[in-house]
Image: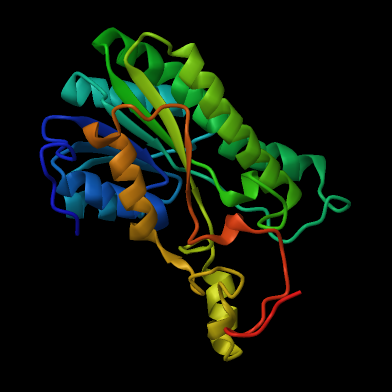
Amino acid sequence: MIMANKETSLAGRVAIVTGAASGIGRATARLLAAAGAKLVLGDYDDKIHDVAMALGADATVLDAGDEEAVKAIVARAMALHGRVDIVHANAGILGGMTSLFDHTVDDWTRILRTNLIGPAIMMKHVGPVMMAQGQGVIVCTASVAGLRSGAGCPAYSASKAGLINLVQVAAQQFSGSGVRVNAVCPGLVETGMTEATFTYAREKGVENKIGRLNPLRRAAQAEEVARAVLFLASDAASYINGHALVVDGGLSTSLPVTRQETGKTAF
């Protein structure tokens, strides 16, 4: 658990976290609460109420791609607390291992709706609130899949690439308002969404191969990504804006190569 100092303290601030029932969203909610923030949490899974109860937070079942639902969670935060200082637009869905040639239009629509249109809708409706306050922070969960190929199916990868660009565009759109917009780009993280991958590897006795292309040779834990979100949401990151912070253990530092054992020459 991170102990808040003056720059990372969120005492008196109000945060909305979407996709907070598990994984990165839940880990972020815990860190924001520990830093002193008041929370309004949303997730499509009704387990969000259990997470909220444990943190003394408010919760609502949320379809992050539905504009009326997004408007409602912003209005709820305003009704309860009178302001919104932080949004972690984290809700997202995967797309399996479907190839470009097998993706249906429904696949594209469903994935882009949640992963890209959802954060855009959140910015649309929370933005005026933050601008009226003269300050606010929006952090989106993108992915290394949005940086280059090989880390997700085509629709998922495209949605995250679009989200990184949206963050850059939004930073400009909020110019002069005191609102910062950034993203985190995780690599492989053990969460509810990736559970099947980890379960399969453990059942086959090949868990040691998870993250083998990563210089750290392991997957991330959700809290490791949540710490980056806490940083971006805090005053410690007061001059960071329009940035996609990579949290992948070094995975994206290299194009795919055949790695040799330490001490041997790789060609």
Q: Residue 112 occupies which quadrant of the picture?
A: top right
Judge whether 225 appears above or below 266 on screen: above
> Can residue 66 be seen here?
no
Residue 68 lies, in percent from the top left, at: 47, 23
Residue 223 lies, in percent from the top left, at: 33, 58
Quarter of the image for the C terminus: give it.
Answer: bottom right
Quarter of the image for the N terminus: give it.
Answer: bottom left
Which residue does the image show at 59% across and 55% down from the upper left?
252
Q: In the picture provided, is 58 more to the left or to the right than 195?
A: left
Q: How is the image coloured?
A: rainbow
Judge whether 5 appears above or below 202 on screen: above
Which residue does the image show at 58% across and 39% down from the upper left?
115
Q: In the picture provided, is 117 more to the left or to the right than 240?
A: right
* Towards the viewer: 200 or 140: 140
Q: Residue 87 occupies which quadrant of the picture?
A: top left
Residue 77 lies, in percent from the top left, at: 26, 26
Q: In the picture provided, is 168 more to the left or to the right than 18?
A: right
Judge whether 178 appears above or below 6 on screen: above
Residue 160 lies, in percent from the top left, at: 61, 41
> Can residue 20 be seen here?
yes
* Towards the viewer: 143 or 104: 143
Total residue callouts:
0
Which residue does the image show at 86% across and 53% down from the upper left?
102
| Residue occupying the far bottom of the picture | 205
Which residue does the image show at 53% across and 62% down from the upper left?
188
